[in-house]
Image (cartoon, grey):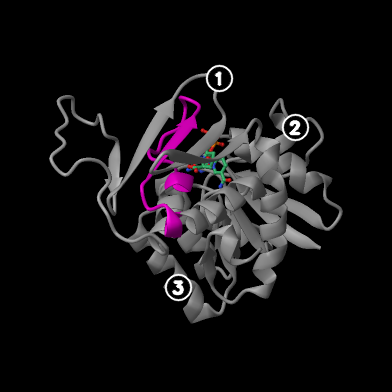
Amino acid sequence: MINIIIAGPRGKMGSEAVRMVTNEENFRLVACLDNKNNGKKLMDLTPFPNLDVPIFEDIDECFDSVEADVLVDLTIPEVGYVHTKKAIEHNIRPVIGTTGFSQEQITELKELTKNKNLGGIIAPNFAIGAVLMMKFSQMAAKYMPDVEIIEKHHDNKLDAPSGTAVKTAEMIRETRKLKSQGHPDEKETLNGARGAEMDGMRIHSVRLPGLVAHQEVIFGGDGQLLSIKHDSFNRASFMDGVKFSVEKVFELNELVYGLENVI
Ligand SMILES: NC(=O)C1=CN([C@@H]2O[C@H](COP(=O)(O)OP(=O)(O)OC[C@H]3O[C@@H](n4cnc5c(N)ncnc54)[C@H](O)[C@@H]3O)[C@@H](O)[C@H]2O)C=CC1
Ligand SMILES: O=C(O)C1=N[C@H](C(=O)O)C[C@H](O)C1
């Protein structure tokens, strides 16, 4: 049995994770971390009528009160970072879906787990299709280095570009010959028109109601275009990856950044 704490249980992803964890035979949800509802139970909140699971606002109190093996964090970047650090301190394996961490934060957290031989996963995207989209893009970039990334999300998203877009660019730069996208003399007459720049690649972030999570990686060549596209139409699309990660962290002895490294 794997004892799990979920941070962010009322969120779009967190509530889906509560459903997944409580439906899995070998998972037990032992507590939730929330920014309100301290002292209540999940069953006091409308979406979870039967769940006798304590809610904590204070992470230290939570970790001192329950025995947990894994922390699943689906919150906001500043909170997720603190939660991950605290989890590592308490030898609780972090499974982090929260996006928006800096490279420095990821490196620091990785070092902390290495010192403790503790497994963990930070996955900017838990959907297997998205992981494949990133891997295929990495392959394509070797042959077609002219590339732009367009990510589209719901308009409640806090971070831009998305964690998936950043990860995609990081993976692409491992195989792509460095080059700057577009005309060397191009000028933006409206700030931001060419999107964000990362290693010469351009990343464009669209935020609209109605969207969930979508990304297209477009490669251009002489007389041809290659589009590699992935769409998540609901949050259930991420849950196989969360489940996989919760089980996988027991086989790891450090924090791994990106599901592509463990599937
Ligand atoms: N890795 C992946 O596959 C995916 C990652 N995400 C990421 O997951 C995160 C959450 O996304 P959504 O569920 O869409 O956002 P959301 O806004 O629906 O949920 C965030 C939740 O965090 C909670 N929260 C804020 N401060 C907190 C604190 N101090 N302690 C505990 N909980 C706190 C809020 O109450 C809220 O319920 C975002 O960073 C998003 O980018 C989202 C979808 C997939
Ligand atoms: O906020 C979201 O919704 C998503 N966030 C992740 C990201 O930033 O890449 C994963 C997915 O795109 C959904």
Closer-to-camera residue (75/224) = 224
Q: Where's residue 20, x and y in %?
A: 76, 44
Would residue 41 be seen by someone viewing this image from the given angle? no
Say the numbered circle drawn on residue 210. Answer: 1
Instruction: Identify residue type, mark 1.
Output: Gly
What residue sits 29% from the left and 59% below the top?
A: 178
Q: Which mark lies nearer to you, 3 or 2?
A: 3
Query: For the residue labelled by badge 2, is the local secondary structure a helix, a strand or a loop?
Result: loop
Quote the CA–CA distance across marks 3 and 2.
35 Å
What residue sits 49% from the left and 78% below the top?
A: 114
Query: Which range is magenta?
Result: 141-165
Q: Which residue is mark 2?
A: 48
Mark 2 residue crowding within 10 angstroms, few (<14) / some (14–19) / many (20+): some
Query: For the residue labelled by badge 3, is the local secondary structure a helix, a strand or a loop?
Result: helix
Q: 71 above or below 88?
A: above
Say the numbered circle drawn on residue 112. Answer: 3
Query: For the residue labelled by badge 1, is the local secondary structure a helix, a strand or a loop?
Result: loop
